[in-house]
Amino acid sequence: GAVVSQHPSWVICKSGTSVKIECRSLDFQATTMFWYRQFPKQSLMLMATSNEGSKATYEQGVEKDKFLINHASLTLSTLTVTSAHPEDSSFYICSARVVAPQETQYFGPGTRLLVL
Amino acid sequence: RKEVEQDPGPFNVPEGATVAFNCTYSNSASQSFFWYRQDCRKEPKLLMSVYSSGNEDGRFTAQLNRASQYISLLIRDSKLSDSATYLCVVRNTGGGNKLTFGTGTQLKVEL
């Protein structure tokens, strides 16, 4: 099946710093990628839809100036958590959308962020 | 009300048992339905799609009742390796084909 990678797999940072997470589709191109966040014992919550060559679409309640998304190529989307705070500590997961032969999302392995 | 609701469990069952998970969804316009499996600290992985006619994949059987907006997953002859969280997932074609995840049902299969 299709492979999606994320980097880094985990990061610990001080409050106030910015953290960039990369999501790559390794053997296919994806015009659409999705960014999710999962807090302990909760479901995955969609943060935004990342569209190659255009602005991301953010879900209600997600601050676009805090969570910067760039989808500069068909195989790479980045999520930057700006001025991270402890409440941003979470499991961030990306997925890449494939439409053929059928609509499917392939998930990356996730990035665990801990903000001290 | 959450768009996708599941009993969080945990379900503790002995090896070899049959276990059933239920899920309800609130958006009657939902078009596609899935069960995903998520292991601790890992990403979710697609277990199976769910079709109106019901479908089976080995020990796993999924059912969909559109009238009741209800989805089920049956696991027969459960194995230790089935221990995971099972996520009920719905896709609505309106609004960009986004996936909506339930909170998951935790399964622990024991010796």
Image: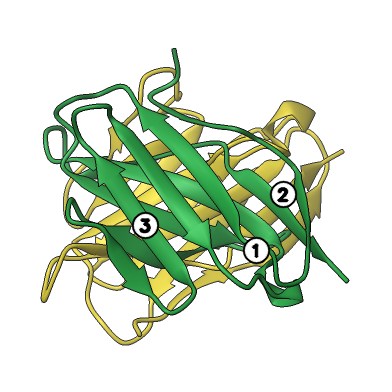
Residue at mark 1: B42
Element type where label 3 sits in the image = strand
Instruction: Please state the horizontal and vertical placement of residue B51, each as a whole percent of the image.
Output: 21, 56
Residue in the image at 71% along x and 72% along y? B16
Q: Which chain is yellow?
A: A
Residue A100 appears in which quarter of the rendering?
A: bottom left
In the rendered structure, which disc, 1 or 3, sits on the residue that comes first in sequence? 1
* Left or right side of B28 for A36: right
Q: CA distance from mark 1 to mark 3?
A: 23 Å
Instruction: Please state the horizontal and vertical placement of residue B90, each as a whole percent of the image.
Output: 31, 42
In what quadrant of the picture does the N terminus of chain A appear?
A: bottom left
Residue at mark 2: A113
Chain B drawing hue: green
Q: CA distance from mark 2 to mark 1?
A: 14 Å
Please, which chain is the residue tagged with disc 3 on? B
Q: Nearer the viewer, mark 2 or mark 1?
A: 1
Please, which chain is the residue tagged with disc 2 on? A
Instruction: Please state the horizontal and vertical placement of residue A90, each as a whole percent of the image.
Output: 68, 42
* Left or right side of B37 for A76: left
Say what amino acid the circle numbered 3 marks. Answer: Ala
